[in-house]
Amino acid sequence: MKKFNAFAFALVFLFVITACANNGSSNKGESAAGVKKVIVGTGNDFEQVAFLDDNGKLTGYDVEVIREIDKRLKEYEFEFQTMEFSNILLSLETKKIDIAAHLFEKNPEREQKFYFNEEPYAYWRNKIIIAAVNNESIKSLDDLKGKKVLIGPTSAQAQILENYNKEHDGAIKIVYQQNDANDEVLQITNGRVDATISADFLLPIKDPQGKLKAVGDALNEGHIQYVLRKDDPESKKLADAVDQTIKEMKADGTLAKLSTDWLGQDFSK
């Protein structure tokens, strides 16, 4: 009887020790108790924004802003999932990711399908980009009629051209980029296309040798925000938390520093 009691006690003791050990640590890849995992969809070939550095580490403005938000929001754990830019919003729609972070501009077309957080984390202007030499004929969208314009599919810049073409019988020949998101300089300087549309801050990043130039008036003022699923209470809760954190990062200068470090100047205001 005593042997049985000793054996039973040993089993109970072993069970308690095992349970305590399991409660004290979480399995790899799982969030700690009470912490909600958030899958962030972004790219890995957008220089200075979301790209792989020489050591293969994902970094850039969008990535480091999210990492700072992650540090400050203890109730969430953010995990990156990289993909082609054209697949990010589709992945959000199909619930493969929870938030899209790739310098997405808020516009009416996107608002029809998705929810945006309220506080932008960057602002800029979209302008027409052409070859820097021997080219004075292009200054507006009207001047692009009959010409080839390179643009990223599903981008806010593509939406500008597509909206123009709807009103002008497809006057501009839109050429959608394939794999390389940074090939505008080569495509324009070798004459394969005539122009592109880009945010003003990107030109010195993509074209440090000054082979291209921005022309004409700004086509729009871009507000850069995060994209989340529409009509989803959890997405709204996450967006509210992110908004408050972005305001704090603006107030303490963190966002301005990240913008200056990665984009060359402060685009956070």
Image (cartoon, rainbow, N blue to C red):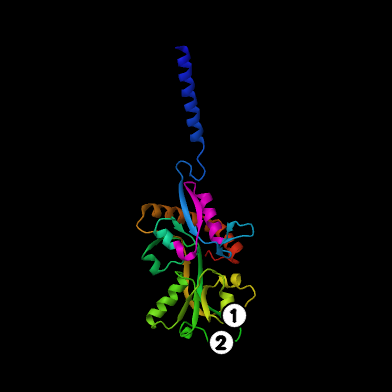
Label 1, residues with CA under 10 Å away: few <14, some 14-19, many ≥20 = some
Q: Point out the frontmost of discs 1 and 2.
A: 1
**170 magenta-colored:** no
Name the image quarter holding the N terminus.
top left
Q: Tell me the magenta residue range.
A: 61-88
N-terminal label among 1 and 2: 2
Q: Is residue 245 something one can see in this rendering?
A: yes
**Percent x, y for residue 200?**
54, 73
Q: Is residue 247 something one can see in this rendering?
A: no
**Residue holding disc 2:** 136
- The label on residue 146 is none
Identify the residue at horizontal 50%, vertical 52% (top origin).
79
| Cα–Cα gap, marks 1 and 2 | 15 Å
Identify the residue at horizontal 50%, vertical 46% (top origin).
29
What SS does tag 2 mark?
Answer: loop
**Residue holding disc 1:** 189
**Percent x, y for residue 177?**
50, 72
Amino acid type of disc 1? Thr
Q: Are marks 1 and 2 in contact (CB under 8 Å)?
A: no
**65 magenta-colored:** yes
Q: Is residue 265 above or below residue 243?
A: below
Count every numbered label the image shows and give the total.
2
Amino acid type of disc 2? Glu
Identify the residue at horizontal 52%, vertical 68% (top origin).
179
Identify the residue at horizontal 47%, vertical 27% (top origin).
15
Residue 253 vs residue 136, the one in the foreground? 136
What SS does tag 1 mark?
Answer: helix
**Percent x, y for residue 175?**
48, 77
**Percent x, y for residue 228?**
42, 58
Residue 191 vs residue 116, the one in the foreground? 191
Label 2, residues with CA under 10 Å away: few <14, some 14-19, many ≥20 = few
